C-alpha cells in the first residue's frame, strides 16, 4: 500500500493543523462518513505520533502515515492525496 501527497495538499495541512517540520499526520479509519472504500467507514486525519507504521511518505519535513492496523481499509489500494482547487481542500483518491 503506497501513500502519496501533492505539495498543495501538504501546504493545506500545514496551515490547518499548524504543522512544522518534524511533525506527523496520521490518516486513520473511523466509523461513519462517506466516500471511502469500505461501506460505513471513512478516513480521519490527526496530528499524532506513530506507533506501528504500515505506510508513510514525507514531504516538506512532515511525515504522513497510516498505522499498520488500518491497512485493511484500503483493500490493496494505494492512497493518493490530491488537491481540489475549486473546493480549496485535499481529496483522497484510491488507486
Image (tube, rainbow, N blue to C red):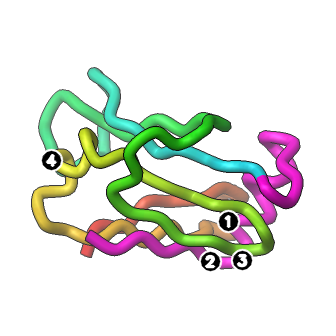
User: Residue 54 falls in which quadrant of the image?
Assistant: bottom left
Do residues under tags 1 and 3 come within 8 Å of each other at their CB atoms?
yes
The residues bearing labels 1 and 4 have C-alpha atoms spaced at a distance of: 24 Å
Of the residues tagged 2 and 4, which is closer to the observer? Answer: 4
Crowding near the residue tagged with mark 2, few <14, some 14–19, many ≥20 C-alpha atoms within 10 Å: few
Of residues 54 and 31, the one drawn nearer to the viewer in this rendering:
54
Which disc, if any, is residue 92? none
From the image, tell me which residue sits under label 4: 72
Residue farthest along the top direction in this orientation:
31
Q: Is residue 46 above or below residue 91?
A: above
Do residues under tags 2 and 3 come within 8 Å of each other at their CB atoms?
yes
Which disc, if any, is residue 9? 1
Of the residues tagged 4 and 3, which is closer to the observer? Answer: 4
Task: Decide which of tag 4 and tag 3 comes sooner along the chain.
Answer: 3
The residues bearing labels 4 and 3 have C-alpha atoms spaced at a distance of: 27 Å
The residues bearing labels 1 and 3 have C-alpha atoms spaced at a distance of: 5 Å
Crowding near the residue tagged with mark 1, few <14, some 14–19, many ≥20 C-alpha atoms within 10 Å: some
User: Residue 3 falls in which quadrant of the image?
Assistant: bottom left
> Residue 68 location in percent, x, y?
29, 48
From the image, tell me which residue sits under label 2: 6
Amino acid at each position: 500500500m503506497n501513500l502519496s501527497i501533492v505539495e498543495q495538499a501538504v501546504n493545506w495541512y500545514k496551515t490547518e493543523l499548524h504543522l512544522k517540520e518534524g511533525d506527523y499526520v496520521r490518516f486513520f479509519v473511523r466509523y461513519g462518513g462517506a466516500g471511502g472504500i469500505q461501506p460505513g467507514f471513512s478516513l480521519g486525519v490527526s496530528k499524532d505520533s506513530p506507533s506501528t507504521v504500515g505506510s508513510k511518505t514525507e514531504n516538506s519535513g512532515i511525515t504522513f502515515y497510516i498505522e499498520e492496523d488500518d491497512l485493511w481499509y484500503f483493500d490493496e489500494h494505494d492512497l493518493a492525496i490530491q488537491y481540489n482547487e475549486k473546493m480549496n481542500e485535499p481529496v483522497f483518491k484510491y488507486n
